[in-house]
Amino acid sequence: GIPYWTYNNGDEPLVAISLLDTSNIANQLDSTPRVFYLGGNPEVEFPETQEEQQERHQQKHSLPVGRRGGQHQQEEESEEQKDGNSVLSGFSSEFLAQTFNTEEDTAKRLRSPRDKRNQIVRVEGGLRIINPEGQQEEEEEEEEEKQRSEQGRNGLEETICSLKIRENIAQPARADLYNPRAGSISTANSLTLPILRYLRLSAEYVRLYRNGIYAPHWNINANSLLYVIRGEGRVRIVNSQGNAVFDNKVRKGQLVVVPQNFVVAEQAGEEEGLEYLVFKTNDRAAVSHVQQVFRATPADVLANAFGLRQRQVTELKLSGNRGPLVHPQSQSQSN
């Protein structure tokens, strides 16, 4: 869902009660409550849920070595997943350093802060945050509400017979995101192809050049089906406990299902690029990128949540934030 943080700036302890509506139409998973933390070593909030998922995870990793891609992969996975319970702990420090263009020490703190801080952190000296005026926030909310009420209307009644039914999202000029070293991303939804509103589907075309990375991200309001159409690469999917539920090479013709809110990252191989289509179960599927979240989060919040120094926060928010498409070599050269 939408990432958020809470800070008590009052003089008394604050007790907050959260109501999780798992039957909400926006939830496309199941009725099991899940909390996805971006940082820290959060304590277990739903023990019975984690026990079930850990049992399935252990059954998966108890398969013979030959069926799991070799002993080296098994040792590597256990080494990467033994620290932290946040979604970033499911990625290696080396991969995070490449993705965010940071030092390895910063990447290690993102995976698991050294002092093992959980989801509640005491801030010494208080937070220094610039807040917008209340009136400005109200105006923005009113504008958003107005836009939502006008969705699906263009002043003319549309019929299925008159709707455009074809869109070539693989055209280079059609790209919504582009990095000359890493690749491009194009999307099609009910705004660009209105008939998708009736199908409740949207699509994404991703082309990664050699070694190109689509940095960690998640679908806010949809499940997705990834289909490889050309090349090869690697896909890693992390669940709410910080476990990599999928970490394998993919090739042409293979399908991978990515559940809603599970964090996923893709990287093309060294020999050739990777091209794939993503079909999403929402006609206006929304994606959240970890890089964008870091950039929008106040510096003091990042420093206290991950135990970072000010220099590391600046590096994370600015140096490593050049869009979700990343090429490791160009990142290191820019330093």
Image (cartoon, rainbow, N blue to C red):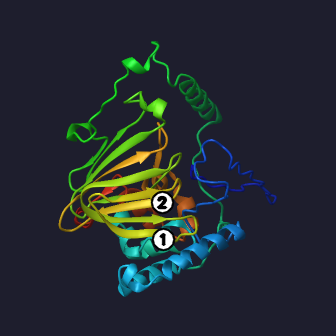
Query: Label 1 belongs to which residue?
Result: 90
Query: Label 2 belongs to which residue?
Result: 263
Residue 239 location (% of width, % of height): 53, 65
Residue 184 location (% of width, % of height): 27, 48
Residue 134 vertical position relative to residue 290 in the rendered view, above or below? above
The residue lying furthest to the top in this view is: 156
Residue 211, by quadrant, is bottom left
Q: Are marks 2 and 1 in contact (CB under 8 Å)?
A: yes
Residue 127, by quadrant, is bottom right
Residue 222 vertical position relative to residue 273 in the rendered view, above or below? above
Q: Residue at x 41, y 74 (%)?
A: 92
| Upstream in sequence: badge 2 or badge 1 | 1
Q: Tag 2: residue type? A: Val
Q: Quadrant of the C terminus?
A: bottom left
Please rate how many residues cluster around mark 1, counting C-alpha atoms within 10 Å: few if below 14, some from 14 to 19, many from 20. many
Please say whether residue 331 is visible from this viewpoint. Answer: no
Residue 157 vertical position relative to residue 170 in the rendered view, above or below? above
* Left or right of residue 100, residue 209 in this image: left
Residue 120 location (% of width, % of height): 68, 66
